[in-house]
Image (tube, rainbow, N blue to C red):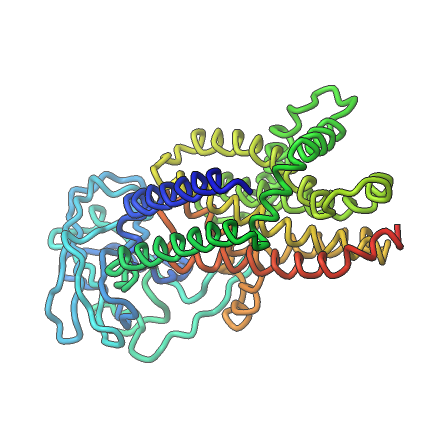
Amino acid sequence: MNRKKLQMGCAAALAVYLLSAVLFYWIAGEQLHFRVEETAAVTPAQPIGELVQGMEVRQPFTAQCDEVTGVMLRLSTYGRTNTCRLIVSLLDGEGSVLAQQILAGEDIEDGALQKVFFAQPVRVDRGKWYAVVLASPDGTPGNAVTVWQGNTISAARTEIPVEIPAGQELLIDGAPQWGMLHVTVQTRSHMQFGAFYWYWAAGGGALLACYCGYLLYAVGKGKDVLILRVISAFRRYGYLMRQLIARDFKTKYKRSVLGILWSFLNPLLTMAVQYVVFSTIFRSDIPNFPLYLLTGIVCFNFFSEASSMALQSIVGNASLITKVYVPKYIYPVSRVLSSTVNLLLSLIPLLAVMLLTDTPVRPAILLLPFGLVCLVVFSIGVGFILSTAMVFFRDTQFLWGVVSMLWMYLTPIIYPESIIPAQFMTLYKCNPLYHIIRFIRIVLMDGISPEPKAYGLCMIASVVPFLIGAVIFKKNQDKFVLNL
């Protein structure tokens, strides 16, 4: 490679890294310093009754965080416009009030989840007891708010009983009840990553600069470096790759009346059918279910299509491979990149559903390319493995149809991860698509940056399969000609 061009490329890489580091710090904001979580709420199975003057509802809990920012309650007014007030307090184990908010009865919506944020986050000690206390100084029968209790958690079409620890039972005027208050405690915990972010960023920049220096040294000495060899191959065979991508894309919609419109219609129609089934027949309680569902469909459809096309990439190009020398990894990579065109087109209906569901489009959407790149890299890795297996074992195409269907049901596309029993969650999270789809959903639905750990998990979920696939492909590519 020309040394001058390499210098320009290294300078561009360092400039992009610096810009990305600054932009990421601005977009991620609070998520770099705090891990925001919320406790699971029980299913509101039974109303406690009207919260009238002199009555106190107390729900103890054990803190597993550094700060409490607020609570979320399900309140009922039975269609009335109440003039009473509701006092929401956070108490410590000794009964001292740490934070308090007063809600006006006329502002409370019947049957809705009421978010109550404290004026300032409240510092708490992990492992210590605290309590959410509800009271009304002027509530009267017919002019009071009703709160709910329960002792199960919803899981698909069933209810899972909750084991209530001793001392965490709901208390009404000091008397223990059979369940717990339907309340979600909003919490956040401090993370050291944010405090040392610029040190990490500077370290990464230094490593990148050192690697660029090594590449320049290697070129000057005439040494062979893998990454330079790959870049050179892509530059040399770039025209061929563009032709292969165009051919695969055109072949997919050949003689189709709607043609490219199917890239928009396919995910939308699939979402419409599954939305009707799972929001009515199976009664899904997932917030913003249309966007949740369509995000999972778009991501998994791309993975399924890309892996299936890559599976046939070597066998399907046998005539080319046996006659013309081209780096064989070009074929599965071009198939995945061809599917990436459909993925990018599918983002248009995805953004349309965001607007239709009044989901705010926030700066965090700029983080979406990271999740998409991880998805593409992961698909290329799987494509390497499948295309290699297909050369030696032609039944791979039939087995993969079954495996991909099973994979779909093991990925939270149409259901929430909360239905998975806690003892199986570690195994469940071994699914690479779980981390990638979760990342994309947080960016689109919550409009915030995921926690720093999510970036690392997405990179592991994509890079590890890619490296495994690349090694398997490289070790077997010389035998392809003998088995085509």
Q: From what the image shows, is residue 276 above or below residue 211?
A: above
**In the image, farthest residue toward the front:** 221
Q: Position of residue 381 (x, y in %)?
A: 64, 53
Q: Looking at the picture, tell me which residue is in the foreground, 291 or 219.
A: 219
Q: Residue at x 37, y 34 (%)?
A: 361
Q: Position of residue 193 (x, y in %)?
A: 30, 61
**In the image, farthest residue toward the bottom:** 166
Q: Looking at the picture, tell me which residue is in the foreground, 387 or 205.
A: 205
Q: Residue at x 39, y 39 (%)?
A: 366
Q: Looking at the picture, tell me which residue is in the foreground, 429 or 358.
A: 429
Left or right of 276: which side holds 289?
Answer: left
Left or right of 215: which side holds 64?
Answer: left
Q: Position of residue 295 (x, y in %)?
A: 53, 42
Q: Looking at the picture, tell me which residue is in the foreground, 217 or 164.
A: 217
**In the image, farthest residue toward the top:** 257
Q: Residue at x 77, y 59 (%)?
A: 476
Whether residue 444 is visible: no
Whether residue 137 is visible: yes
Q: Position of residue 357 (x, y in %)?
A: 43, 33
Q: Quadrant of the N terminus?
A: top right
Left or right of 148: which side holds 292?
Answer: right
Left or right of 80: which side holds 292?
Answer: right
Q: From what the image shows, is residue 93 above or below residue 253?
A: below
How many discs appear? 0
Q: Residue at x 54, y 56 (%)?
A: 434
